[in-house]
Every structure is written in structure tokens, then in C-alpha cells.
Image (cartoon, rainbow, N blue to C red):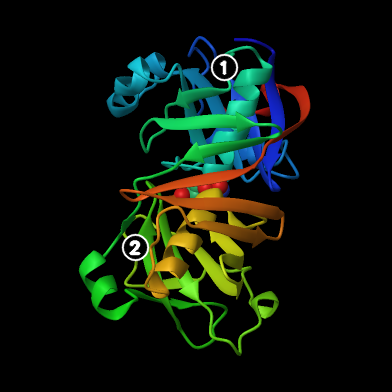
Amino acid sequence: MADRLAYTKGHGTENDFVLVPDLDGALGLSAARAARLADRRAGIGGDGVIRVVPTELADEPAVREQAGAARWFMDYRNADGSAAEMCGNGTRVFAEYLRREGLEDADAFTIATRAGAKAVRRDGDHWSVELGPWRLADAPTAERDGFDALVHVGGGDPFSALSVDLGNPHTVVALPEEVELADLDLLEAPSVRPEPPHGTNVELVRPVGPGHVVMRVHERGVGETRSCGTGACAAAIATSFWAGSLDTGSTWLVDVPGGRLTVRLLPDHGVELAGPAVLVADGSVPTALLPD
Ligand SMILES: N[C@@H](CCC[C@H](N)C(=O)O)C(=O)O
């Protein structure tokens, strides 16, 4: 085994990741090792860890099936080491890394993820990614009532919410007018009822103008983060749904603490996320400091 583990640190609207190249699939990545790399004190620090591995060498058969469409698999782990199906901001940072390293040389290509193959496209210093199809997790209830969940944040009164599936789970809260977004306490995970079987990411959303929302997010497996790409898509979808106009072609600006994302609703439950991707540092860690 090598003495040192190479990594690259990157972020998308300050949702930050440790990328670990595993170009021959020999490294693997245990949950304990991912959690240590993401640790902001004892490790490198990040909201997530992304292993860069050839799709044909992925552990999961459903991922290996994408090998015909996508050469590289984004093996995404949350900061607590748990595997997640999808990370919207992560896809852009992953794409930027593949380009910089010469692992892909086109401006548009497809990457493999646990939520299926996703098309990415470079546009200057931004990347866009098609993250659909999305679906309402409890469509019959949502279509009847507009909401399908209740969310308690910091012990206050519950807020009505809508569950949106983007490959990974989201619960979007429609904040009442009198509640200040900045005042909400997201140190503890919001409690969601009915309890989602595999946990959820919770978005707190406030419209600020036509096609424009601000959002804070508590991510499953992480805590409050400064951005969440799939969360931004869920916020745009839920806000459109509540307004009664899931217009395809409509564009949403989603402001998060770490910057601004753009979301476009597409036909057939498609949704496109666009935003920056920045690679900030390269380095290596002695493997002796990392759990196996
Ligand atoms: N930050 C990501 C989402 C990462 C995964 C999430 N915490 C989960 O467990 O589903 C994004 O940009 O989408």
C-alpha cells in the first residue's frame, strides 16, 4: 500500500469536497476513512468525499451497468462516511477534476452516479448537469394537499413541507412569512414526520421574487452546509409546484449562503442545475494517519 493518499480539495458554492483518485480501483474507500478525510480537525475537511473510480470497477452492479455511457463513477460519501446516491454540486466539481486531469477531454460528457448516468456540460467557468427525473415522493398526498410532511426545526411549531426525490431524498419547507430564515437553528437535524426511511436533506425556502428563492439546508449525513445542488433543484420544483405552475423552461435563481445556483425545469420531470466548480488545493495525507 502507498505511504500517502493523494487528494484534491474543491467546492461548488462552498459545498466542499475531498476528491480521492482511485484510477485503478485498487484503493477502495471505507466509511471510516471517508469520515476521517472529511473531518475538519483531524483530516482535510469537507462536506463530502468523492472517490474517482472507473465505472467498470464500481462495487455496485447498477453503477457498473452505466459503463457504456460513462467512463468515471462519482463514488460520493457524506462527511459521516455514509454513501449518498447523488450530489449536485459534487457532479460539477467531479467534472472539473476529470477535465483538469485529462481523464475527459470534451466539454460535454456523462458521469456515472448511484442515481444513474448524468450528462454534464461546461460553459466557461460554470458546469451544468441534468439531474432528473425528479418525482414527488408521496405524489397522491402532495397533489391533494400541496404538502406531505411536517418538519420541526429547533423545537418550534412544525412547518408544512413537500418531499421531492432527486435520486436522493429532500424535504422542502415552505417558510411562513413571519419566520426569519436567518433565525432558524439548524445545529440539530430537523425532525421530519412521517420519518423518511433513509433520512432526508431538509431545505428551508423563502421566495424573494419571481423565479428567485433563498434557501438554507441541513444535509443528511453532514449538518448545515453552505449549499446543496440537489436541494436547490428540490427548492425550485417545490416552489413551482406550490405556485401551480411546473412550467418547463422556467429558470430559477437559488441563493444559498455559499453563492448562487441556477435551476432550469425541463420537460418530462427533467431539471438542470448550473453553477461554479472550483479546485482549490492538491496534496497528500500519510496513510498511517487514516483508518483502513
Ligand atoms: N450536497 C449535495 C448532496 C449530498 C448528499 C446528501 N447529503 C444526501 O445524503 O443525500 C448536493 O449538492 O446535492
Instruction: Report the front residue among 266 and 142.
Output: 266
> Can you give x and y, in whole percent of width and height, for residue 151 in the image?
45, 76
The quadrant of the image that shows the N terminus is top right
Circle 1 packing at 10 Å, graded few (<14), some (14-19), many (20+), is: few
Circle 2 packing at 10 Å, graded few (<14), some (14-19), many (20+), is: some
* Label 1 sits on residue: 106
Instruction: Report the front residue among 244 and 214.
Output: 244
What's the amino acid at mark 1? Answer: Ala
Answer whether residue 239 is visible to the viewer in this image: yes
Q: Are marks 2 and 1 in contact (CB under 8 Å)?
A: no
> Can you give x and y, in whole percent of width and height, for residue 130 in the image?
45, 39
Instruction: Report the front residue among 57 and 5.
Output: 57
In this picture, residue 14 sits left or right of residue 148: right
Distance (Cα) linking label 2 and label 1: 39 Å
In the rendered image of this protein, does residue 28 appear above or below residue 202?
A: above
Answer whether residue 221 is visible to the viewer in this image: no
* Label 2 sits on residue: 196
> Can you give x and y, in whole percent of width and height, for residue 93 in the image?
62, 33
Q: Which of the 4 image quarters holds residue 99?
A: top right
Query: Residue placed at 58% from the left, 13% from the top?
Result: 103
Element type at mark 1:
loop
Query: Residue placed at 34% from the left, 63% from the top?
Result: 196
